[in-house]
Image: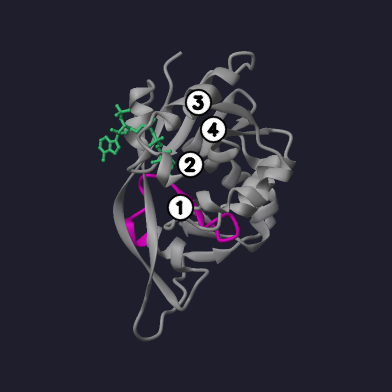
Amino acid sequence: MEIGTLDQNDIKLISDLQPTDWQNIIPTIEFYTNTDFCFPIKVIIEEKIVGIGTTIIHDDIAWLAHIIVHPDHRNQGIGSVITQTLVGNLKTRNCETIYLIATELGEPVYKKNGFETETEYLFFKDIKINGSWKTPKNLVAFKDCFKVEIANLDLQVSGENRLFHLEKQLPSGHVYLQNNVVEGFYLSTWRGFNNCKNNVSRSGANEISIGHKRKRSFCYRQFYCKRVFAPK
Ligand SMILES: CC(C)(COP(=O)(O)OP(=O)(O)OC[C@H]1O[C@@H](n2cnc3c(N)ncnc32)[C@H](O)[C@@H]1OP(=O)(O)O)[C@@H](O)C(=O)NCCC(=O)NCCS
């Protein structure tokens, strides 16, 4: 087994790794290979890429992302090797916290490698709705005057300063306003990214999600995805 840096030339070789229930991974992996704060790796067995994973570094926080092992090679420890390599590569960086969002398949791997659950995320799944749907009055299209509140809210919820990322997506985003305070925001172009304070009601969270896609609703379910961190 060899481990190396995943670069742009590898993009055409990884389509076999696409998990069936995920959005197309290629544009995101391509982004990782072109971006100076992302560090994608590959695992090669018999000249074939059988696994990938990426570290994303935002200041002193790192995220592990897109850890995927080809179905024919799963349960042989490769997922753990990728996780350990990505974590090991961070030793020379000044990262105190490592986050990731775990799928059901990923959770046992990360737990085995010292990650702990910090909080749970809610994922919204598209379903068709019957009849018409009206934009709720609390849901408002982005304006520049919301930017500071959005940045503060995101910092509060994620613990990271990600305004440099968010800024590109904000113009097509929406906010959820309660008493003229931004309680949540929705960015359709950031893979439906949706952040809100704990006190936003379930319907509020739903409104944030469906605001941009009027022909669809989202079913609400508590998901298995978790945000975890590695012990120092
Ligand atoms: C998650 C994933 C990367 C793991 O890769 P892998 O190479 O199979 O991982 P490993 O072999 O290192 O570890 C799998 C472990 O999970 C265990 N496991 C698998 N399914 C499990 C389940 N439902 N419950 C409990 N343990 C489970 C295996 O027994 C194995 O443990 P062991 O090594 O102690 O026997 C792979 O399943 C994958 O690509 N899934 C699709 C993409 C995905 O969900 N990625 C994770 C993103 S967070």
Q: Which mark is residue 98?
A: 3
What is the crowding at mark 1: few (fewer than 14 residues within 10 Å), some, or many (at least 20)? some
Q: Is mark 2 within 8 Å of ligand 1?
A: yes
Residue under pointer 4? 63
Q: Is residue 71 above or below residue 171?
A: above
Q: CA distance from mark 1 to mark 3?
A: 23 Å
| Magenta span contains residue 201 | yes
Residue 126 shows in this picture: yes
Q: Quadrant of residue 116?
A: top left
Among numbered discs 4 and 2, the one appearing first in the sequence: 4
Residue type highlighted by circle 4: Trp
Q: Is mark 1 within 8 Å of ligand 1?
A: yes
What is the crowding at mark 2: few (fewer than 14 residues within 10 Å), some, or many (at least 20)? many
Residue under pointer 1? 19
Q: Quadrant of residue 39?
A: top right
Judged by depth in the image, the label closer to the viewer, 4 or 1, is 1
Among numbered discs 1 and 3, the one appearing first in the sequence: 1
Residue under pointer 2? 68
Q: Residue at x 51, y 32 (%)?
A: 159
